[in-house]
Amino acid sequence: MISVVVPFRNAEHTIRACLEALATQAMQPKEIIMVDNGSTDGSGEVVLAFIRERNALNVCLVKETKIGPSAARNRGIKEAGGEIVAFTDSDCVPDKHWLEKVEQAFRNPDTGAVAGRVRGLNPTSVIDKFHAMFTMQGSPEAQNFCEFTLLRGGFPTANLTVRKLLLDSLGGFDENMKIYSEDYDLCARIYQAGFCIRYEPLAVVYHQHRNTLKGTWFQSFGFGKGHPILLKRHFRSMVILALPGVEYQSRRLPLKAWLDFKGADKKLFILIILCLFYWPAAILTIAFFFYLFADMRRHLGRRKLQARLTETWRLVLLLIFKSSALSAGRIVGSIQNGVLCI
């Protein structure tokens, strides 16, 4: 008894593929609830046409006038009649066995939610390949999570399924939370309620990632801006220091700080500062770019993706671009929330 909830806003170019994938699941859901969150394009018409053409009696279209993904998903929760509510997005294409694998993972009563793997859909362009390697990556191994630590335990609603009774007891998503942090906030509250989240890599959803520089910047900036909010909301004290190959985490110090020096942008910034005081350090800067190039080739090989040499250099620049957007979001969020997160 699974209800699928899909919020959407101006998604006429992607929503049909999402519906087709949901309608052909190996294990059919009780219902598919499409929540229109103020679309001004033809998204709603696409959904209605799909219902008519496929005689899809288990697909319904509802509207939520309060703008925001949390409000849209909460509307879907209210409409849901299943014991389990599965969330995905209108730019996602679930694998045929998605719900089947999700249902199997719920057989442990201590499991309050199941998070699946998010993979890139048909990565062909340089930006598509980049996001397929570096956006919303999940482990290939199944595991249980029972604590939110900022570094681990949070999962995106592109592929997240929660027990209906648990959602009702938690009040659903916090509608005061901005996009890019409301899903991790829900995960943190699931743990606080005494439940675990099962990560199941075989429950796959394919995501059509942002394929423009502007979209990539705003998404990464939003992710970064959400980190200080989560740090402030869910921890009385927390200090995280992340260095290449080293992670230190403590709740003993009366601080709320997350210092992440693993990003490519921060490493490059340190090298540039060093060059200002000691110009021969420029050699290290050049060597750093070639290191990033070699590492990018390794990532491409692991994902079985092809890229020309010029494309690989563009991927390197995209990595610096994305990490810079993430850092910028963290700085802005730190100022707004009174914590230290860079």
Image (cartoon, rainbow, N blue to C red):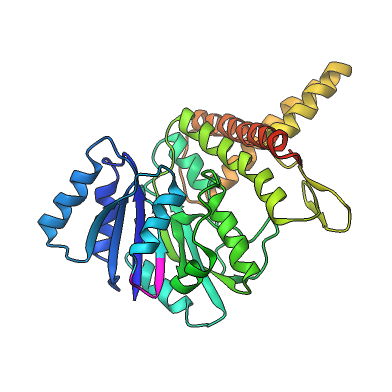
In percent of the image, x 69 and y 44: which residue is there? 228
**Spot occupied by residue 72 in the image (x, y as percentages of width and height):** 39, 51
Q: Does residue 213 lie above or below 150 as drawn?
A: above
Left or right position of 22 against 321: left
In percent of the image, x 55 and y 58: which residue is there? 155
Q: Does residue 293 lie above or below 298 as drawn?
A: above
The quarter holding residue 128 reads top left
**The C terminus: image quadrant:** top right
Does residue 330 appear anywhere in the picture?
yes
Does residue 95 appear anywhere in the picture?
no
Region of the chain picked out in magenta, as a range: 81-85
Q: How many marks?
A: 0
Q: Does residue 107 lie above or below 81 as drawn?
A: below
Left or right position of 312 against 24: right
In percent of the image, x 17 and y 53: which residue is there? 50
**Spot occupied by residue 164 in the image (x, y as percentages of width and height):** 44, 71
In percent of the image, x 29 and y 55: which residue is there? 34
**The N terminus: image quadrant:** bottom left
Q: Nearer the viewer, residue 313 or 116?
A: 116
